[in-house]
Each structure stands twice: as C-alpha cells, then as structure tokens.
Amino acid sequence: LSKDIHWAFDHGLIGVGDDRRLIVPGAVATLSGNAYLADLVGKPIREAATPVLRARAEAFKWHRENILLQ
C-alpha cells in the first residue's frame, strides 16, 4: 500500500469486502478532495502470489465491523 492508502485504511476511509474488492463509504467518497478514494470503489486488491501471505478474510471482516466508517 502507498502511504496515503495505508493511512486511509487505518482510519476507516476504505475497506475490503468479502469479494476482496475495495469499499469506500458513501460519506467518504462524496467529500470534496476524496475523488482518488471514490475511484477505488470496486477495484480488486493486489495480493501476494503465495496464498499463505495473503490477509485473512476474518481480518477484513473485523476491519469492516470495527474501523470502516459507516
């Protein structure tokens, strides 16, 4: 992740769905200055070629339930 995208993920501005595509809450996407985040909606994440190195679905679920802005 780039520094900016990592920051956005850590602060709940973006998340990853069960389909492993990016989520940007509507309230975030519609704010001026967030067009670069809105452009990410629905894009698949890039993952490690080795499955054991990929983030677990449970981690993304926890992030959506506890960090991602609603």
Image: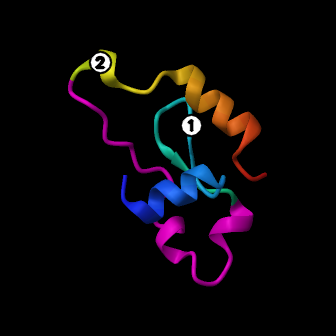
- Which residue occupies 56% across, 51% down? 9
Can you tell which quarter of the image residue 29 is in? bottom right
Q: Secondary structure at mark 1?
A: loop
Cα gap from disc 2 to disc 1, whole angstroms: 18 Å
Magenta stretch, main secondary structure, is loop
Can you tell which quarter of the image residue 33 is in? bottom right
Can you tell which quarter of the image residue 58 is in? top right
Contact between labelled residues 1 and 2, with CB atoms less than 8 Å apart: no
Instruction: Name the residue tied to disc 1.
Output: 17
- Label 2 sits on what residue type? Pro
- Which residue occupies 46% across, 35% down? 20
Badge 1: residue crowd in 10 Å (few <14, some 14–19, many ≥20) = some
Work out whether 56 lies above or below 8. Answer: above
Residue 48 within the magenta-colored segment of the rendering: yes
Q: How many marks?
A: 2
Q: Specify start and end residues of the magenta stretch as a single range.
A: 26-49
Q: Tag 1 or tag 2, which sits nearer the N-term?
A: 1
